[in-house]
Amino acid sequence: MISRDLALQLRDAGLVWHPDSGDRFQLDLPSDVEADVEADTFTVSEMTIETRRYPTGTILAFNGTTEWALDSVALADAVWLPREDQLRELLRATFRALRRLPDAFEVEVELGGERRRFEHPDAAEAYGMALLALIERTR
C-alpha cells in the first residue's frame, strides 16, 4: 500500500478515482474532525462500504458495520490508496520494468523518449512515484 503522502500528491496532481470493490482508502476530513479517524484504512466492499453514484456526485456509503457513526462521505473526502497492480496498470505503455535491487525496488518507465527510474523499498511506492512523474508530465 502506498503512503498517504504519496496518495495525496497523486490526487492533487489529478489522479481520478473510480471506486471499485477491493479499493482501499483513508478519509481526508476537515481539521475539526479527530485525526485518528483519518489514520484508519477502509476497503470498498458491497457488504460494508459501497460506492453509490448519483447525478450530484459519488459517495462512499458505510453500511452500519464500522465502529463509529458515519453514514457516508463524499468521494472528495476520501484518499485512494491504490494497490501495486492498479499503479502498474495506470502507467500503461510507459512501464518498462520492475527490478529487485539489494535494498529496494526499481520501476523503470519511458517518459517523452527518456528512460526514468524510481527506487523505493516498497514496490508500490516506486510505482506511485513513477505515476506521479507521468501525471505531472502530462499536466
Image (cartoon, helix red, strand yellow):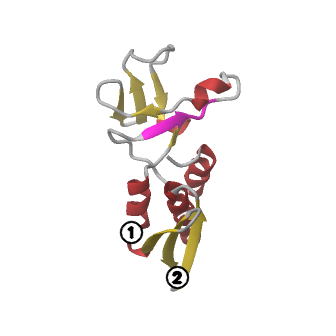
Q: Which residue of the protein is positioned furthest toward the bottom in this rendering?
A: 113
Q: Quadrant of residue 66?
A: top left
* 52 with respect to 112 (left or right): left
- Mark 1 or mark 2, which is nearer the start of the sequence? 1
The crowd level at tag 1 (other Cα within 10 Å; few <14, some 14-19, many 20+) is: few
Taking depth in this image into account, of 51 and 46 the one nearest to the observer is 46
The residue at which mark 1 appears reads as: 92
Residue 123: horizontal and vertical position, in percent? 50, 58
Query: For residue 26: magenta?
Result: yes
Q: Quadrant of residue 125?
A: bottom right
Looking at the image, is 55 positioned above or below residue 70? below
Name the amino acid, label 2.
Gly
Q: Are marks 2 and 1 in contact (CB under 8 Å)?
A: no
Looking at the image, is 85 positioned above or below residue 1? below
| Residue segment shown in magenta | 24-29
Give the secondary structure at mark 2: loop
The crowd level at tag 2 (other Cα within 10 Å; few <14, some 14-19, many 20+) is: few
Residue 50: horizontal and vertical position, in percent? 34, 30
Count of marks placed on residues: 2
The residue at which mark 2 appears reads as: 112
Q: Residue at x 39, y 16 (%)?
A: 65
